[in-house]
Image: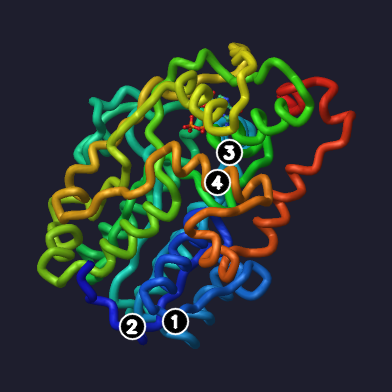
Amino acid sequence: MSNYIRKDAKIFVAGHRGLAGSAIVRKLRSLGYENLLLRTRQEVDLLDSNAVSSFFAEQRPDFVFLAAAKVGGILANRNFPADFIAQNLRIQSNVIESAYRAQVKRLLFLGSSCIYPKLARQPMGEDQLLTGPLEFTNRSYAVAKIAGIELCWAFNRQHGTEYLAAMPTNLYGLGDNYDLESSHVLPALIRKVHEAKQCGNRTVTVWGTGTPLREFLFSDDMADACVFLLNLPKDEFHKLTGNPEMAPLVNVGSGSELTIGELAKKVCEVLEFDGEIVFDTTKPDGTPRKLMDSSKLFSFGWKPKISIEEGIRIAYAEFSGKSQSPVEDVNERTSSHESKNRARDSVALDRSDCADPGQRQRN
Ligand code: GDP
C-alpha cells in the first residue's frame, strides 16, 4: 500500500460506529494512524448543518472517510423511502460542503452498488451509472447516493478538490445489524439459522424465490480497499478524480456472486444446520442480479482477502458471542459497545421466540 496519508494526519471517519466506518477505523489503527477524529451522533449530528460546519471549522481534518449513512435491507428501504432519501442527502451535503470549506485534502464517499440501473449490463462497470431505470425497492436510497457521487464530481470540477466515491457491493461483517426487519440478507440468514438451531426447528425461512444473484464483501476487505484508494500516489489518484469527463467513481467488490439460495446453503453449512430451506415468495426479490465490475480497483493491485466462508465464520463468531476470529483482538479494542450488545441481545432467545420460526418479522 502506498502512503500518501502521513501517519500523523488528522482523519475524520464519519459514521465510525457503523459496519463500514468501524471497519475503516480498525484498518487505519492497524496501519498506525492514531490521529483519528471520531464523533458520536450526540456529539456531532451530521443531519445538522450548523453542527457539522462548526465541527469542521474547529477541527480542520486533513482527510475524510464519509461512511455515515442511513442504511438498511430490502424491506426497510421499501417501507421508509422518505427517511432514506432525506437523511442521506442531508448527511452527505453537510459533510462534503464543510469539507470543502475546511480545505480537506482528500475525501472518500461511500455509496452502494444499488446506484446502478436495475437491468444494468453485468458485471456493472462504473460507466453504467445513469444509463437506465433504478430498482424500485431501493430507488430513494440510490438517488441520494447518486447525488453524493455528483456532489464529489461537481466539487472536483468547480473547485479542483480530490473527492472520490467508492461503491461497495453488499457488505457484511463485524458489528452488523441483525434486526430481521431492517437488516441485509447475510446477517438475517446468520440469525435465522442460529435461531432455528437453538429452537430445534427443522426449517429456516428465506425471503423471495432464492434466485437473485448477489456479490458479497467482508467489511474489513472493503475498509482495506478504501484506505488503499485514499492512499494512492498523487498521479494515480488524479486519474480517478481529475478527469472532468468521468465520474470520480470506483467499484469495490469481490468479483464473485452466488444466488440467495446458494448463500442460504452456505450459511447452513458453516453453522452446521442440516434442516430444510423454505422460500417465502410473498417477500420481494429486489434486483435480479448485481455483480460489480471491480476491474478498475483491481488494476491498481488491490484484491480481497477474506472468502465468503471465512467471513460468515468470523461474523457468526461475533454474533454468537464466541469470537475466536483473527480480527477479534482488533475488534475488541475498537468496535462500539452498542453493536456488540446488539449482536449479543439477538442471541438470547426465550421459548416464545421459537413459536413461529423465521416468521417473527412483520410485513
Ligand atoms: P438488496 O441487495 O438491496 O436486495 O438487499 P437485501 O440484502 O435486503 O436482500 C437481498 C436479497 O436477499 C433479496 O432478494 C431478498 O429477498 C433476499 N433475502 C432472503 N432472505 C432475506 C432476509 O431474511 N432478509 C433480507 N433482508 N433479505 C433476504
Residue occupied by mark 2: 7
Mark 4 vs mark 3: give the one in front: 4
The disc at residue 315 is 4
Residue beneath label 3, please?
A: 187
Given this view, does label 4 or label 2 mark the residue nearer the observer? 4
Residue 220, percent from left and from top: 42, 55
Crowding near the residue tagged with mark 1, few <14, some 14–19, many ≥20 C-alpha atoms within 10 Å: some
Q: Quadrant of the C terminus?
A: top right
Q: CA distance from mark 4 to mark 2?
A: 29 Å
Circle 4 Cα neighbour tier, 10 Å, few/some/many (<14 / 14–19 / ≥20): many
Q: Element type at marker 1?
A: loop
Label 4 within 8 A of ligand 1 by Cβ? no
Circles 1 and 2: CB atoms closer than 8 Å: yes
Residue at image point 53% right, 81% down: 54
Amino acid type of the residue tagged 3 in the rendering:
Pro
The reply, left or right, for residue 214 in relation to residue 83 is left
Name the N-terminal-most of marks 1 and 2.
2
Q: Earlier in the sequence, mark 1 or mark 4?
A: 1
Question: Label 1 belongs to which residue?
Answer: 34
Q: Is residue 81 positioned above or below 136 on the image?
A: below
Q: Is residue 161 above or below residue 239?
A: below
Q: Position of residue 204 (x, y in %)?
A: 66, 20
Instruction: Tell me if 61 is positioned left or right of 131 in this view.
Output: right
At label 1, the amino acid type is Glu
Q: Where residue 254 appears, x then y in whole percent? A: 31, 41
The kind of secondary structure element at disc 4 is helix
